[in-house]
Image: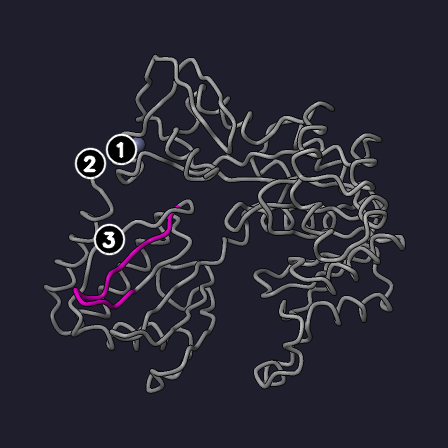
């Protein structure tokens, strides 16, 4: 029996309605437990003219469940805010708080709940932190064999910068954490490991985790004095005095953090970080724009790769045996066959189940690439040279996944734009 997410919601709504005394309490519980069961990463409660629209983000894509009449808006907001210990009577300021695992019956994950005042009432977003047992190892990330080997090589290094590039929602943070966990759990060599995070999602044994603010000047603001978090760049400089061997920086976003990070990598530390960008080659240009000198990039970056997450087609997909010319990121590609999503009860009618990570590894230590960086070559040139040196680009990789039915054309277009 096919049951879509909207149909599921319909059932929850009717069942809750029957228990009229605590309608919203029961409904919210069903929504939270249902979201966790469908592995949603976020739930949105968005008040609008037609009611409070409820959406789940599953595998990076938003799905609309349905609406609850607008008259229940404040009740919904209040119920959710109570879980996170937020002030229910304050409805005109944004608030944010955490919900410990086990606080809500039937939910084992930690959640973060944030509220924001909007025209029709408070918009509430629930974010599920990934389960603690997820992505403990490099293997569990699900990359292809050569990428796994590459990541294993990364953690044997003693110095240099390891940069994981990708747009938001590409899984780069998950990869960084898996590397950190492998380093921390390595029994052969004990290393001094420090990570600077915004926020800390899970405690990792053997790592000194420090919560910082990623905003460079926020150390001075009122908010931060209250929460006592230092800005990332300042904390990074400070931690250099604490004898670290491995440093993880959640994300490099601006010049000062970039400078401090590359400095650490150049002075005998292994630095792991993520960076926002469309491709590995593009990140070089963006670091140059931030004011980092080419020779610093050339000498400090040891590993540079870019990744994407594509939704994996459910086994209910349909094979189309027909040649197809496609254009992805300005490149024309031809596939011999492709697959389309269908939908079944297994995948909640979405046609997809889980995600596939895809990586592009820039051969940063290759002489040709090194020279191109020193000459401040354009992204296009670096990309072309890297492919000549044997790099498989993300687009080529995706085309192969289309042909083998791992993902769909629509999904490839959604992710690669
Ligand atoms: Zn299916």
Ranked by sequence position, the earlier of labels 1 and 3 is 3
Which quarter of the rendered picture does the C terminus lie within?
top left
* Crowding near the residue tagged with mark 1, few <14, some 14–19, many ≥20 C-alpha atoms within 10 Å: many
Q: Looking at the image, is mark 3 or mark 2 nearer the viewer?
A: 3
**Relative to 200, residue 225 above or below:** below
Between residue 293 and residue 125, name the one nearer to us.
293
Ranked by sequence position, the earlier of labels 2 and 1 is 2
Residue 208: give x, y in percent of width and height: 73, 64
- Provide the residue designation for mark 3: 65
In the rendered structure, find residue 343 and report the number of the disc placed on it: 1
Between residue 213 and residue 392, name the one nearer to us.
392
* Crowding near the residue tagged with mark 2, few <14, some 14–19, many ≥20 C-alpha atoms within 10 Å: few
Query: Image check: 83 left or right of 162?
Result: left
User: Which quadrant of the structure image shows residue 86?
Assistant: bottom left
User: Which quadrant of the structure image shows residue 263?
Assistant: bottom right
User: In 3D space, how far apart are the residues under numbered discs 3 and 2 (Cα atoms)?
Assistant: 15 Å
Region rendered in magenta: 46-58
| Local secondary structure at mark 1 | loop
**Relative to 34, residue 415 above or below:** above
Residue 294: give x, y in percent of width and height: 81, 47
Residue 191: give x, y in percent of width and height: 82, 53
Residue 148: give x, y in percent of width and height: 66, 33
Q: In the image, what residue occupies the spot 39% across and 84% down?
A: 87
- Provide the residue designation for mark 2: 2
Q: How is the image coloured?
A: one colour
User: In 3D space, how far apart are the residues under numbered discs 1 and 3 (Cα atoms)?
Assistant: 16 Å
Tag count:
3
Query: Image check: 122 left or right of 324?
Result: left
Q: In the image, what residue occupies the spot 28% across and 63% down?
A: 29
| Local secondary structure at mark 2 | loop
């Amino acid at each position: 029996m096919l049951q879509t997410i909207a149909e599921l919601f319909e059932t929850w709504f009717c069942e809750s309605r029957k228990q009229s005394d605590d309608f919203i309490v029961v409904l919210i519980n069903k929504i939270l437990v249902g979201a966790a069961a469908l592995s949603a990463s976020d739930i949105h409660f968005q008040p609008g003219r037609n009611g409070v629209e409820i959406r789940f983000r599953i595998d990076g894509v938003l799905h609309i469940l349905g609406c609850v009449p607008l008259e229940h808006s404040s009740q919904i907001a209040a119920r959710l805010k109570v879980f996170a210990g937020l002030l229910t009577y304050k409805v005109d300021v944004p608030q944010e708080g955490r919900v410990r695992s086990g606080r809500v019956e039937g939910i084992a994950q930690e959640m973060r709940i944030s509220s924001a005042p909007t025209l029709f009432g408070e918009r509430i977003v629930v974010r599920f932190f990934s389960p603690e047992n997820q992505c403990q190892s490099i293997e569990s990330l699900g990359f292809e064999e050569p990428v796994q080997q590459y990541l294993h090589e990364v953690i044997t290094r003693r110095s240099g910068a390891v940069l994981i590039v990708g747009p938001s929602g590409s899984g780069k943070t998950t990869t960084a954490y898996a590397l950190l966990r492998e380093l921390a759990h390595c029994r052969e060599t004990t290393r001094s490991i420090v990570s600077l995070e915004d926020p800390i999602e899970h405690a990792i044994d053997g790592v000194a985790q420090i919560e910082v603010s990623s905003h460079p000047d926020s150390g001075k603001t009122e908010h931060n004095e209250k929460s006592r978090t230092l800005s990332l760049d300042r904390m990074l400089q400070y931690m250099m005095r604490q004898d670290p061997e491995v440093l993880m920086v959640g994300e490099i976003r601006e010049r000062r953090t970039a400078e401090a990070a590359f400095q650490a990598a150049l002075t005998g530390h292994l630095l792991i970080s993520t960076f926002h960008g469309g491709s590995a080659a593009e990140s070089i240009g963006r670091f140059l724009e931030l004011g980092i000198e080419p020779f610093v990039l050339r000498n400090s970056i040891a590993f540079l790769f870019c990744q994407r997450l594509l939704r994996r087609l459910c086994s209910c997909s349909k094979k189309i045996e027909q040649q197809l010319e496609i254009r992805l990121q300005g490149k024309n590609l031809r596939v011999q066959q492709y697959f389309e999503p269908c939908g079944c009860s297994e995948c909640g009618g979405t046609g997809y189940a889980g995600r596939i990570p895809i990586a592009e590894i820039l051969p940063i230590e290759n002489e040709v690439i090194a020279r191109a960086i020193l000459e401040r070559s354009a992204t296009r040139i670096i990309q072309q040279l890297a492919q000549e040196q044997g790099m498989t680009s993300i687009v080529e990789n995706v085309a192969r996944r289309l042909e083998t039915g791992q993902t769909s054309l629509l999904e490839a277009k959604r992710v690669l734009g």
